[in-house]
Image (spheres, rainbow, N blue to C red):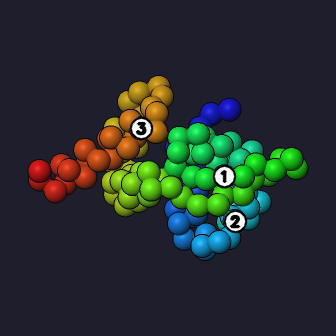
């Protein structure tokens, strides 16, 4: 499967907005809110975000998962890509390459922000 960068951002934004402390955001609920993505897209993206250290996720036998929380690194990543204008600029820059990792997206977003601040 391919990691869809827009799905990464949308899931992170959804988790931040909808996950309450001591609750679990089930992949079926996330997919219902983000219905432009398939359940497989949501599950796979959550799996990769767990591996990247951005989310804490439980995976269930029935083929679904539940997001427990966003990690500190996840918050840092989301803060760098949250702004729609920044995200649009980041996507424009990374579109020149065949593939880009999440850490590179974070670095590009951070550099775009630094440039906007004039530092």
Among numbered discs 2 and 3, the one appearing first in the sequence: 2
Which residue does the image show at 71% across and 47% down from the upper left? 43
Q: Are marks 2 and 1 in contact (CB under 8 Å)?
A: no
Q: CA distance from mark 2 to mark 1?
A: 9 Å
Is residue 102 depicted above or below 16 in this figure?
A: above
Which residue does the image show at 66% across and 58% down from the upper left? 67
The label shown at residue 24 is 2
The residue that label 3 is drawn on is 103
For numbered disc 3, what is the local secondary structure? helix
Residue 89 in picture, x, y percent from top left: 33, 48
Mark 1: few/some/many CA within 10 Å (<14, 14-19, 20+): many
Is residue 105 depicted above or below 14 in this figure?
A: above
Residue 21 image-quadrant placement: bottom right
Q: Is residue 71 left or right of residue 86?
A: right
Mark 3: few/some/many CA within 10 Å (<14, 14-19, 20+): few
Q: Which mark is nearer the camera, 3 or 1?
A: 1
Residue 75 in picture, x, y percent from top left: 44, 58
The residue that label 1 is drawn on is 57
Residue 13 in picture, x, y percent from top left: 52, 62
Q: Is residue 92 visible?
A: no
Among numbered discs 3 and 1, the one appearing first in the sequence: 1
For numbered disc 1, what is the local secondary structure? strand
Is residue 108 depicted above or below 14 in this figure?
A: above
Q: CA distance from mark 3 to mark 1?
A: 19 Å
For the view shown, which residue lies furthest in the front direction?
Answer: 22
For the view shown, which residue lies furthest in the right direction?
Answer: 62
Q: Is residue 4 left or right of residue 100?
A: right
Q: CA distance from mark 2 to mark 3?
A: 26 Å
Q: Are marks 3 and 1 in contact (CB under 8 Å)?
A: no
Q: Nearer the viewer, residue 54 or 112?
A: 54
Q: Is residue 3 visible?
A: yes
């Amino acid at each position: 499967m391919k990691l869809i960068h827009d799905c990464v951002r949308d899931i992170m934004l959804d988790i931040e907005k909808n996950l309450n402390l001591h609750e679990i955001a089930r992949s079926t609920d996330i997919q219902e809110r983000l219905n432009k993505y398939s359940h497989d897209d949501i599950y796979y993206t959550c799996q990769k975000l767990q591996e990247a250290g951005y989310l804490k996720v439980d995976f269930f036998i029935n083929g679904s998962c539940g997001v427990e929380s966003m990690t500190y690194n996840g918050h840092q990543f989301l803060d760098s890509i949250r702004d729609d204008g920044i995200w649009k600029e980041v996507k424009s820059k990374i579109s020149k390459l065949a593939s880009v990792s999440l850490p590179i997206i974070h670095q590009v977003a951070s550099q775009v922000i630094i440039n906007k601040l004039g530092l």
